[in-house]
DNA sequence: ATGGCTAAAGCATTTAGA
């Protein structure tokens, strides 16, 4: 099963680039972030025509997540538990039925949190606390689980081309990184780091200041696997050249191959 | 502190991203 995450930065703006990548990469399942669309405006027919089931959790203008799957989906749920007041569309879950078994897939768009300190940063940390609770619940099932998406966290200095530029940013502050590690240390595996070590691996390049041309990137899109999923991991790659295409998102896809 | 760019809402400019 090929499972991918891709922050597309607007479904309308990616009307050409997203189908182009799907046709080339042929993922079985992809979790999308920042669809920036209400559910009714999502062009589901385009993807249904390519053989994908479409499940969206959108809102007007900002945020919004979705799951596209060529495999059957069961028990789709929308929203991160723990705060009934939270109206931001950043979390969707579904059980994907693979050839050899099932996996619970969570698609997430973790809050940016800038400027820090401030209410947006407080929201980010509170959201990560809620995510940790949900992650612990899912681990307790002892089933394969993948939590994949835009985490808006740079885990380590080697995950940024210029770490010194991020020291006061919500993506790299010690509190953000500690909250990320608390989730990881419940027992999840960072799929990319299980397959690749060292610096120079990024998933986001700013549109400004020729960041792509200078390879001034950061690694903030992650796939975290429960032990039962990590045991089935055979490959993980960043599709970095998508950033060089026409009208690209500022993020690129990251995918895993799982023997499920 | 800002932000050289991009997207969305909506029609001029603001908000948000990271």
Image (cartoon, rainbow, N blue to C red):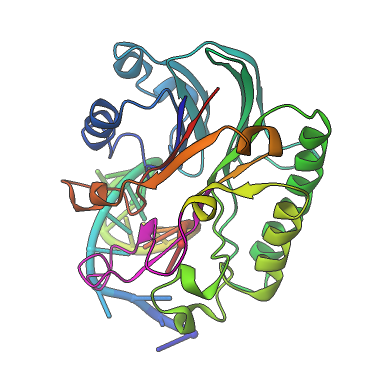
The structure residue drawn at horizontal position 29% and vertical position 28%, both measured from the top left corner, is: A22
- How many marks the image carries: the answer is 0
A64 vs A188: above or below: above
Above-or-below relation of A213 to A100 = below
Q: Is residue A99 left or right of residue A9?
A: right
Q: Residue A251: x percent and y percent?
A: 37, 51
Instruction: Answer whether residue A202 is magenta in the image.
Output: yes
Q: Is residue A164 above or below residue A47?
A: below
A128 is within the stretch colored magenta: no
Nearer the observer, A176 or A72: A72
Residue A256, image x, y percentages: 46, 37
Q: In front here: A179 or A60?
A: A179
Image quadrant of residue A25? top left
User: Which of the image's four quarters has the C terminus of chain A?
Assistant: top right
Q: Main secondary structure of the magenta part?
A: loop
Residue A206 image offset from top left, x and y in percent: 33, 64
Q: Residue at x 42, y 15 (%)?
A: A70
User: Relative to the observer, which residue lies in front, A37 or A236?
Assistant: A236
At 63% across and 33% down in the image, what residue appears? A229
The answer to whether A125 appears left or right of A45 in the picture is right
Q: Which residues are magenta?
A: A196-222
- Position of residue A258 measured from the top left corner of the image (x, y, whole percent): 51, 30
Residue A179: quadrant of the picture? bottom right
Left or right: where A247 falls relative to A224: left
- Would residue A206 appear left or right of A135 to someone viewing this image? left
Q: Is residue A79 above or below residue A194?
A: above
Quarter of the view holding residue A185: bottom right
Q: Residue at x 47, y 62 (%)?
A: A197
């Amino acid at each position: 099963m090929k499972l991918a995450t891709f922050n597309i930065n607007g479904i309308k703006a990616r009307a050409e680039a997203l189908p182009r990548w799907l046709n080339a990469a042929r993922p079985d399942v992809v979790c999308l972030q920042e669809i920036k669309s209400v559910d009714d405006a999502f062009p589901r027919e385009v993807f249904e025509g390519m053989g994908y089931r479409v499940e969206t959790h959108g809102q007007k203008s900002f945020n919004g997540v979705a799951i596209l799957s060529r495999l059957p989906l069961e028990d789709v749920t929308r929203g991160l538990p723990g705060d009934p007041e939270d109206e931001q569309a950043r979390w969707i879950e579904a059980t994907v039925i693979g050839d050899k078994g099932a996996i619970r897939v969570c698609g997430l768009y973790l809050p940016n949190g800038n400027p820090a300190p401030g209410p947006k940063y407080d929201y980010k940390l509170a959201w990560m606390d809620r995510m940790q609770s949900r992650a612990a619940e899912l681990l307790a099932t002892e089933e394969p689980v993948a939590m994949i998406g835009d985490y808006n966290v740079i885990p380590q200095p080697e995950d940024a081309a210029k770490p010194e530029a991020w020291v006061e940013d919500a993506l790299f502050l010690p509190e953000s990184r500690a909250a990320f590690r608390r989730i990881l240390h419940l027992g999840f595996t960072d799929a990319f780091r299980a397959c690749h070590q060292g610096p120079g691996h990024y998933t986001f390049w700013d549109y400004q200041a020729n960041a792509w041309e200078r390879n001034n990137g950061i690694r903030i899109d992650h796939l975290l696997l429960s032990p039962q999923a990590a045991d089935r991991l055979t490959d993980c790659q960043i599709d970095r050249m998508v950033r060089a295409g026409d009208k690209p998102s500022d993020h690129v896809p990251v995918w895993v191959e799982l023997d499920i």
